[in-house]
């Protein structure tokens, strides 16, 4: 494995940490998702740095940042773009929407209607959009980082299971530790910390890292371990809906990315155990819960934790 690529990856994490203090785990998870060509959903309270994380990741990776504020009147064309009639040429010309970026922040995604939310399905699955009978490729690398406030339910449209399944990880950043928060408050000025960041890689180099992740070794015993976790989500009495094949593939690739970020060319069982909840919990439905009671994700995380504890670790 190229030491130059490994060094660039370390620098990427360190550069993002300059703008977002006290969120090392969230930063590492976001970088892993980005380098694994996945998408990230962040469920959290306002003001913990979700937008800063997306902007810092885009800037440090040399990519283009785009932000879409999801509202109830947002239309699919506001995301993908629209064809406009040009009088001079007497033909339609396509005007790209904000989805044409490297890191796209879908802010408060659950405030848009299901019709608008569905505009992201093809983008997230295939990295392209269909407009007026034509298919247009999105920039590479491409990542959707979506946010939603789980404490607010009025005027929101919960994401369907098919949409949730497109996200490689679902995380909660949480409040920073007291010492880190004190630093944030002490350094607060009108200067934007993201603007002080410098790119450590270019988009083309990021794509090289994406390909390098494919070379991370995953032992057959670890693949069997992943399969057993997935199988038990389908058989347990704790869950109504288990994890589908896409979830297993996401866990496999996310573990490779985590190993890469931590300077290893092989995966460990600990990588799977660490990522099981953020990769799998949002893909399952616990029994006896309702989306609006606020406890579904917590119960799902506990169910995944119970399954982890029950599966024998291969030697």
Image: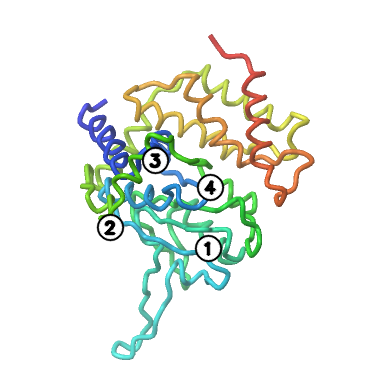
Separation of disc 4 and disc 1 at Cα?
23 Å
Residue placed at 45% from the left, 51% from the top? Answer: 47
- Dot 3 corresponds to which residue? 181
- Using the image as rendered, state which of residue 248 and residue 156 is in the foreground: 156
Q: Earlier in the sequence, mark 2 or mark 3?
A: 3
Question: Which mark is on residue 106?
Answer: none
Q: Which circle, 4 or 1, is nearer the viewer?
A: 4
Q: Position of residue 157 (x, y in %)?
A: 64, 60
Which residue is nearer to you in this view: 313 or 287?
287
Q: CA distance from mark 1 to mark 3?
A: 37 Å
Judging from the image, what secondary structure is the residue with disc 1 in?
A: helix
Task: Count residues near mark 3 (Cα–Cα under 10 Å), then give few for <14, some for 14-19, many for 20+.
Answer: some
Distance between the alpha carbons at the discs numbered 4 and 3: 17 Å
The percent coordinates of residue 12 (x first, y second) are 28, 39
Q: Few, some or many C-alpha atoms within 10 Å of disc 1 (few <14, some 14-19, many ≥20)?
A: some
Residue designated by label 1:
119
Q: Which badge, 4 or 3, is on the more N-terminal residue?
A: 4
Distance from Cα at disc 2 to Cα at disc 3:
17 Å
* Residue tagged 2: 190
| Residue occupying image coordinates x 30% and y 56% | 64
Which residue was labeled with disc 4?
A: 44
Element under label 2? Answer: loop
Q: What is the C-alpha distance between the residues marked 2 and 4?
A: 25 Å
Label 4: state its secondary structure.
loop
């Amino acid at each position: 494995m190229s030491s130059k690529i490994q060094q660039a990856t370390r620098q990427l994490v360190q550069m993002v940490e300059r703008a977002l203090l006290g969120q090392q785990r969230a930063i590492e998870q976001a970088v892993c998702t980005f380098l694994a060509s996945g998408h990230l959903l962040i469920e959290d309270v306002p003001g913990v740095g979700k937008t800063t994380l997306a902007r810092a990741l885009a800037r440090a990776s040399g990519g283009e940042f785009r932000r879409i504020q999801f509202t109830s009147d947002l239309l699919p064309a506001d995301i993908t773009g629209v064809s406009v009639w040009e009088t001079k040429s007497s033909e339609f010309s396509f005007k790209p929407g904000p989805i044409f970026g490297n890191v796209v922040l879908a802010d408060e995604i659950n405030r848009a209607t299901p019709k608008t939310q569905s505009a992201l399905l093809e983008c997230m699955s295939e990295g392209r959009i269909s407009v007026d009978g034509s298919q247009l490729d999105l920039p590479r690398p491409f990542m959707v980082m979506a946010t939603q406030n789980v404490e607010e339910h009025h005027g929101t449209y919960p994401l369907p299971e098919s949409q949730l399944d497109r996200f490689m990880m679902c995380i909660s950043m949480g409040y920073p530790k007291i010492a880190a928060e004190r630093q944030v408050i002490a350094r607060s000025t009108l200067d934007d910390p993201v603007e002080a960041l410098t790119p450590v890689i270019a988009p083309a180099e990021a794509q090289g890292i994406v390909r390098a992740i494919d070379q991370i070794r995953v032992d057959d015993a670890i693949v069997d371990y992943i399969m057993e976790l997935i199988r038990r989500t389908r058989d347990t009495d704790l869950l109504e809906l288990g994890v589908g094949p896409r979830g297993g593939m996401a866990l496999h690739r996310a573990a490779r990315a985590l190993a890469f970020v931590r300077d290893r060319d092989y995966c460990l069982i600990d990588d799977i155990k660490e990522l099981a909840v953020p990769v799998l919990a949002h893909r399952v439905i616990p029994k006896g819960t309702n989306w609006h009671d606020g406890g579904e994700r917590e119960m799902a995380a506990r169910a995944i934790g119970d399954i982890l504890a029950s599966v024998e670790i291969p030697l």
